[in-house]
Image (cartoon, rainbow, N blue to C red):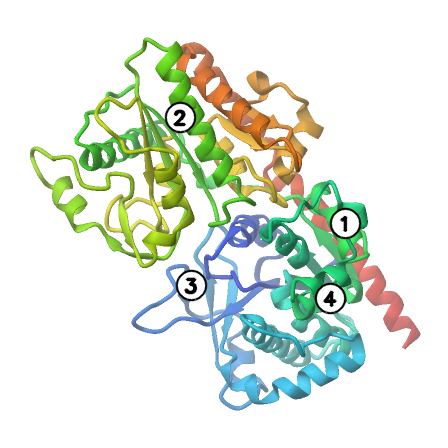
Amino acid sequence: MFNELLMLDLLFETSWEVCNKVGGIYAVLSTKAKTLQKEYKNNLIFIGPDLWTDENPSPTFIEGRTPLAAWQRQARLPEGMRVRLGHWDVPGKPIAVLVTFDVLYPYKDALYTEMWKRYHVDSLHAYGDYDESCMFAYAAALVIESIVKWKNDPALRIVAHFDEWTTGMGLLYVKSHLPQVATVFTTHATSIGRSICGNGKPLYDYMPGYFGDQMAAELNMQSKHSLEKAAAHAADAFTTVSDVTARECLQLLERYPIVTPNGFEQNYVPKGANFTAKRNAARQRMLQVAACLTGQSYADDTLIIATSGRLEMRNKGIDVYLDAVASLRDSLGFVSSKDRKVVALVLVPAWMKSPRADLLENLHADNPHRLFDPVITHHLHNQDIDPIYNRINALGFHNEPQDKVTVIDVPCYLHGDDGIFNMTYYDLLAGLDAAVFPSYYEPWGYTPLESAAFGVPTITTDLAGFGQWVLDSFGDDSDRYGVKVLHRTDSNYGETVRAIAMSLMNLYVMSDKTYRAIRNANRTTSKAASWDNFIKYYDSAYEQALLHADERNKKS
């Protein structure tokens, strides 16, 4: 529980992913919300971008009356800047404020000039999503400023928490214009660290030799990096999500953060008979899709495995996963006399165009036939250059009738409306027999934590924050704790592939009794990573931020 001495009167948290599911930060905030809401109730306010229209509404924002209605009626904001009040439709249903920011672009140069003079933020080399992110962050800061002035009580203890470099400009504005507000900045992954990995450079073996500013110039990342670094140093409390990323922050941002590991809200996991029903439905649907692609039949004992995450072949270990599945295929051809089949899914969104019409037709047919190109469920805009699709074909996966291993690329967001599965990611997760996340760059790793919470035997690496947490907390005993954590370095790719293939083979031949024990162990391990246990780390960060703000205000 929270430290009662905090006496926090208002807690703002700003992120591009409030009511806007893009990546892992959405999982962090949406699952953390219930625990924070329990403590702060209507004093907790999430701020996100209003990217929605009547034709395309946010699926997780419920517009309606909140205690901020009186503020909204007299809010002093730039002309044309709109805010919508309501609740985030996640456990806890906290207050959410969605803000538009397009009207702020005329103020961009003045803001960037101020931030250069105050914090040496280099916006000169900006490109891509930099301007959009900064204008949203500026809008969020103006909302915070307006609410604080509306409250008009200098005794209030207020924390403004900003997530990722995309909100850094907002933190710097609050620090400059609202010195009474304590600021917290969380980097979930450093922009320059991700860029180093994304450009194929070895991060870990050469970490002591990397200088963040130098690498930013080399990789054309000056603006994002300088903003993130400035926010990290200006914040009253600087946090990150794992010990793995803390070392990266120290080296590349030159400040050591408080480690606030990511928890999970167990309410997302169905219980008892409901879970069994969802698991059976998911398995039936996944095997049906496989049958309608390949023309094969798949028995109930088919081993269904998957990986998921952002489309980053190296960082997320998608390349390792596919190579490991190919190794498993080759091994099964030599050492196994079992007829049991394997379906290996890649649940990674890409530039999806539409569901395959021929697959849809097969799904409604009495006698589905084998389709041309039976390795992918949706059409892509760029199928000829898609890295996952090309890797599957290069490895010789053609899903022939005689193949024991079927590989299927599912290149869409699983929100329940993809046109083929029409089930959410969590719905399908319940039906898996194993999940593999062999990450190279993974500051925390929500996907392995989620799969463990759903009782799915999980394989990850010690380069993922969650994997390292498992090792530090429980040791290397996957039979007892359910999560297999593999050692991964810059130079042991082949060894990692072989270890995953061996782990999958063990699951393939495992007895039902042993398998059930591992599923139960996963659930137990995941409960240790619940927000009830991890929220204390945010308690420490907020306390540090408030102390620094108090010291600053005493001097002024």
Left/right placement of residue 512 relative to residue 32 reads left
| Residue named by callout 1 | 258
What residue appears at the point 72 percent right and 73 percent down from the top-left corner?
A: 172
Q: Disc 3 or 4, which lies upstream in sequence?
A: 3
Vertical placement of residue 28 versus 229, above or below? above
- What is the number of the mark on residue 374? none
Name the disc covering residue 231, or none. 4
| Residue neighbourhood size for the residue with mark 4, other residues' Cα within 10 Å, grouped as few (<14), some (14–19), many (≥20) | many
Q: CA distance from mark 1 to mark 4?
A: 14 Å
Going by the numbered disc 1, the residue's amino acid type is: Ile
Nearer the camera: disc 1 or disc 2:
2
* Circle 2 residues within 10 Å: few <14, some 14–19, many ≥20: many
Report whether residue 525 is seen: yes
Residue 317: image location, x then y, percent = 53, 39
Q: Are marks 4 and 2 in contact (CB under 8 Å)?
A: no
Local crowd at mark 1 within 10 Å, few (<14), some, or many (≥20)? many
Q: Which residue is mark 3?
A: 61
Label located before the other in sequence (3 or 1): 3
Which mark lies nearer to you, 1 or 4?
A: 4
**Residue type, label 3:** Phe
Circle 3 — which element?
A: strand
Give whichever of 295, 14 is nearer the camera: 295
Residue on which disc 2 sits: 433
Q: Nearer the viewer, mark 3 or mark 1?
A: 1
The image quarter containing residue 410 is: top left
